[in-house]
Amino acid sequence: MVTVVSAILRRDLELGFRRWGDVASPLMFFAIVTALFPLALSPAREVLQGLGPGVLWIAALLAMLLSLNALFRQDLEDGSMEQLVVGPHPLPLIMLAKALAHWLLSGLPLVLLAPLLAVTYHLPAEGVRALCVTLLLGTPTLSLLGSVGAALTAGVRQSGGLLALLILPLCLPVLMFGSRATALAAEGEVVTGPLYLLGALLALAVTLVPATSSAAIRISLD
Amino acid sequence: MSDFLAMGGYAEYVWSTFGLTAVVLVINMVGARRRLRNSLREAGLRAARQRRQAS
Amino acid sequence: MKLPTWFHKLGSPPHFYRLATLLTPWFYVPAVLLLLAGTYGGLVLAPADYQQGDGFRIIYVHVPSAYLSTMVYGVMAVASAIGLIWRMKLAHSVAAAAAPIGAWFTFLALVTGAIWGKPMWGTYWEWDPRLTSELILLFIYLGYISLRGAFDDRDKADRACAVLALVGVVNLPIIHYSVIWWSSIHQGPTIKKLDAPSITGDMLWPLLVMILAYTLIFAALLLQRVRAEVLDRERNARWVLDIMGAPAQGN
């Protein structure tokens, strides 16, 4: 069990690092989108402080979405997905490993970059800390939800826009809790409530998503 | 009668919602009917073709 | 799980097709009559609300469509589950047929709610929890319809869409309660609620009549659309060719 998970992780991470452009493009997207708002709206401190939590969260969500299309592409093209499906290992576990690999490659870097961008929005220290914690709790849920969408659209040509249409409504709770918690923390309030809810969403996603995405990938493959 | 049409000052809101509802209902009724007609025509053509081939 | 035989019989396309053809007018005619009665009752017989005046009459078209928008999703989800678990093609046809109807009524609930908002809130759009959830429900319907359209293979589309519908069922309550939480910290309870102006008997019956009428019209539309789906899917089956031997009749 552990070996198959670590094998998939190692393979996906190696592939990711070999094409480091794929890993870097969501990060650059994240940075550029957050830079658009001060330029388009107003560089005023109060405006940015008000917008910051929402903008950073939306940009992170869209950046994660950007890399989802490629989640199963490589595996489908070289036929290794079919091997995994018919292979002896439980498919839900494999799907969980795939989602984890996606998060390590495109979620975690966002979490690490976020504080830097938050400072450009003049978020106070509590706000920056809350942003990191909410992203840390929220982005794995986004990876998991995204893996369901990617599995459902794996057999479809031109899946980019469709994937966004399917996934974004499902991601809304994470976005709402994440950005509101960040905003509340920036105003100096206690945010354990929304953090627990984000944690609950993550727990729910870890429980339900692997079985769902393996059902979806089976449908897409046969 | 004009009292009724005025809807106590809410005429534009009440009549626009009721009108829109009527439009959407009619669209759905016509849409479902047309969809069924098309399928029936298609199936009919196919059946006729098969009968011709059989005879 | 073992299914009763009537269920299998219902799941057989020719049987269902015949039954649906037979039943459609029995839903359609009462639906239209009740729709007219409910509209008359709502616009003429019901007294004006003491707070909202005649503006409250929008309730008679808004609430039934809002109810249908979720009820249809429920039908779609149950049909999808049946289709996935027992591999029943007819259930997938039902889900496919329900989606566009559900999307239309969600749209209707959204727009009538927004128009009602203008006299009540002073603005067409308020990020009120119910309107927001309704909007997201519309997106989910549209996603479902787009996913179905993206597949060439009908069988694959059926099963992928069924999975999506079930994912939606788990997510809709989460989204709904998140939106409620989110707006409760956002704007507080100052917003006047849309529904339930202290409703009296002579205001209530037209609403119930309308809800019944909407349910029946949904049933009638669904039956017609399922017949079309079944015909498309079974176009080469013996029974379709047999039916088509007789002059085509649609209603």
Image: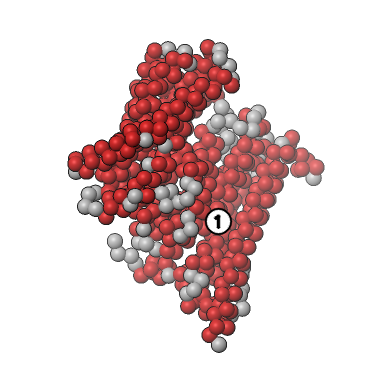
Q: Residue furthest front?
A: A18
Give the image quarter of residue C170.
Answer: top left
Give the image quarter of residue C213.
Answer: bottom right
Give the image quarter of residue C249.
Answer: bottom right
- Whether residue C211 sits left or right of residue A86 in the image: it is right
Count neighbours of disc 1 (C-alpha within 10 A) and say few if under 14, some if 14 to 19, many if 20 or more.
many
Which chain hosts label 1? C
Check the picture and name the quadrant holding the C terminus of chain C: bottom right
Q: Is residue C135 visible?
A: yes
| Residue at 58% in and 49% down | C104
| Residue at 37% in and 25% down | A111
Amino acid marked by disc 1 = Phe
Q: Residue furthest bottom?
A: B55
Check the picture and name the quadrant holding the N terminus of chain C: bottom left
SS at mark 1? helix
Q: Which residue is mark 1?
A: C218
